[in-house]
Image: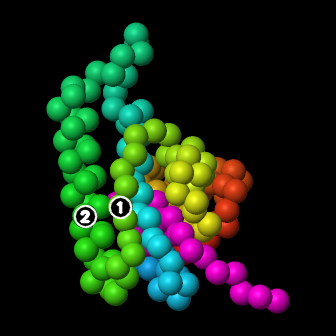
Amino acid sequence: MTEQEYKTILVPVDGSEAAEKALTKAVEVAKRNHAHLDILNVIDLKQFSVSFAGMLNASGDVVYQTFEDVDKYLAELQKKVKDQGLDDVDVHARFGSPRTVIAKDFPEDHQTDLIIMGPTGLNAVERVFVGAVTDYVIRAASCDVIIAR
């Protein structure tokens, strides 16, 4: 049996401890495979309040500040990964549904052949369901998925 080689690895991050552990595992796997690592944060616009008319109540400033915070967080992670000896790493921020972006959209756009993620994220409701996003990615992704514990 031949060992699977991975060339493009995706690790979605959300600031949670589980995501940070998944990133550590992803760096190890990327180094062993001489692979490219993509670090992704998906900004779900549903996290901002929505009025009864369906209009976003959050001001453009709130959305902009959120993106700035994510950009800073991703830059810190990229530096951390490079300090660990992996130079082939890119960071990405996308707006959308985390489950769809992680399982389908991003991997299709970047030819991802492995997703490494934590079992749960920051959202307490998702933790009750043992990681609703993780569960969806496991079922819907067209590439291999590793859950880092």
Q: Secondary structure at mark 1?
A: strand
Q: Residue at x 27, y 83 (%)?
A: 83
Rate crowding at label 1 as few (under 14), some (14 to 19) or many (20 or more) other CA atoms within 10 Å.
some
Asked if disc 1 and disc 2 are in contact, CB closer than 8 Å, the reply is yes
Based on the picture, tell me whether residue 4 belongs to the magenta stretch.
yes
Determine which residue is flagged by label 2. 75
Query: Residue 77 is drawn in which quadrant?
Result: bottom left
Residue at the far top in the pictured view: 53
Q: Is residue 144 left or right of residue 133?
A: right
Comes first in the chain, label 1 or label 2: 2
Q: Residue at x 17, y 32 (%)?
A: 61
Q: For the residue marked with disc 2, what is the amino acid?
A: Ala
Q: Amino acid at mark 1?
A: Val
Of 15 and 60, which appears nearest the observer?
Answer: 60
Q: Vertically, is 129 above or below 63?
A: below
- Residue 5 lies, in percent from the top left, at 64, 81
Residue found at the very far right of the displayed protein: 1
Residue 91 image label: 1
Can residue 65 be seen here? The reply is: yes
Task: Assign a secondary structure to mark 2.
Answer: helix
* Region of the chain picked out in magenta, as a range: 1-23
Depth check, front residue: 57 or 10: 10
